[in-house]
């Protein structure tokens, strides 16, 4: 919240709405504040969510999971932004203001090829069922309704689909620099802050491989007293 507040104040200062930025530049970040816990969907939740989404919204959700793109980025995509030769999407209006190329996974080209069949390059890649493009905040209600039908509690927002994409990459041991590039982060700091704990690492692998079982090779079999007595009486 402090970061957002400083950004707004800096914007006001650059626009000459306030005479100085000295006051908030002296404010230091709060101590002992952990990185936010990033919510991501499990494989079972992904399957349930996709099964409950319908029509064009299902395609939009599927694309977000496969690419890690933000809702606004997906809504602005045109068919010409898809390069079938190298299987990438070109994000021309990213949050950072820089153009980036999103690498598509195996399922994504199949989805896009189905959507663009017979359409012109200048047409919007993702459209609603009524034929018009998606607009600001139009994902909120269908996402909430889909989560309710899928039994995902608490309901998640569309941006969690982006977190899910990145979390899957991290858990598959994809280097943080590659994940950062896919998401469009300027460096790996934010990526590592949110996803590094999910990645397999040498320390964790070494500890799990080296620490012995304390109870022997098999867990002891515990039989309830009543059942043990029944077995003895039956044997006699």
Image: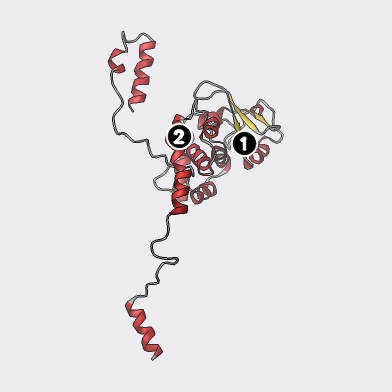
Name the residue at 50% across, 28% down.
185
Q: Secondary structure at mark 1?
A: loop
Q: Is residue 51 left or right of residue 197?
A: right
Can you tell which quarter of the image residue 79 is in? top right
Q: Characterize the local packing of mark 1: few (<14), some (14-19) or many (20 or more) Cα atoms within 10 angstroms.
A: many
Expressed as whole percent of the image width and height from the top left, the position of residue 217 reads 45, 65
Residue 149 is at least partly visible in this image: no
Question: In the figure, 130 relative to 100: above or below?
Answer: below
Residue 99 is at least partly visible in this image: yes
Q: Secondary structure at mark 2?
A: helix
Expressed as whole percent of the image width and height from the top left, the position of residue 37 reads 38, 39
Q: Is residue 42 left or right of residue 59?
A: left
Question: In the figure, 76 relative to 166: above or below?
Answer: above
Q: Characterize the local packing of mark 2: few (<14), some (14-19) or many (20 or more) Cα atoms within 10 angstroms.
A: some
Can you tell which quarter of the image residue 18 is in? top left
Q: Depth check: 3 or 137 in front?
A: 3
Can you tell which quarter of the image residue 103 is in? top right
| Image quadrant where one finds the C terminus | bottom left
Residue placed farthest to the bottom in the image?
236
Q: Is residue 121 left or right of residue 182?
A: right
Write down the residue under mark 1: 104
């Amino acid at each position: 919240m402090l970061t957002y507040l400083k950004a707004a104040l800096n914007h006001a200062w650059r626009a000459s709405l306030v005479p100085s930025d000295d006051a908030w530049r002296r404010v230091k970040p709060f101590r002992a504040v952990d990185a936010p816990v990033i919510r991501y969907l499990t494989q079972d939740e992904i399957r349930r969510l996709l099964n409950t989404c319908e029509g064009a919204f299902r395609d939009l959700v599927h694309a977000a999971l496969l690419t890690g793109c933000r809702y606004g980025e997906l809504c602005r995509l045109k068919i010409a932004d898809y390069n079938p030769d190298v299987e990438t999407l070109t994000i021309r209006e990213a949050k950072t203001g820089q153009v980036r190329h999103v690498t598509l996974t195996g399922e994504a080209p199949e989805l896009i090829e189905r959507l663009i069949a017979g359409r012109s390059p200048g047409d919007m890649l993702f459209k609603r069922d009524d034929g018009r493009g998606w607009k600001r905040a139009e994902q909120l209600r269908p996402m909430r309704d889909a989560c309710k039908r899928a039994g995902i509690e608490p309901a998640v927002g569309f941006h969690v689909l982006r977190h899910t994409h990145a979390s899957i990459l991290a858990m598959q041991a994809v280097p943080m620099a590659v994940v950062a590039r896919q998401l469009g982060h300027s460096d790996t700091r934010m990526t590592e802050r949110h996803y590094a704990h999910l990645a397999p690492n040498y320390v964790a692998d070494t500890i799990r491989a080296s620490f012995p079982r304390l109870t022997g090779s098999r867990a002891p079999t515990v039989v309830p007293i009543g059942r043990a007595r029944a077995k003895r009486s039956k044997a006699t």
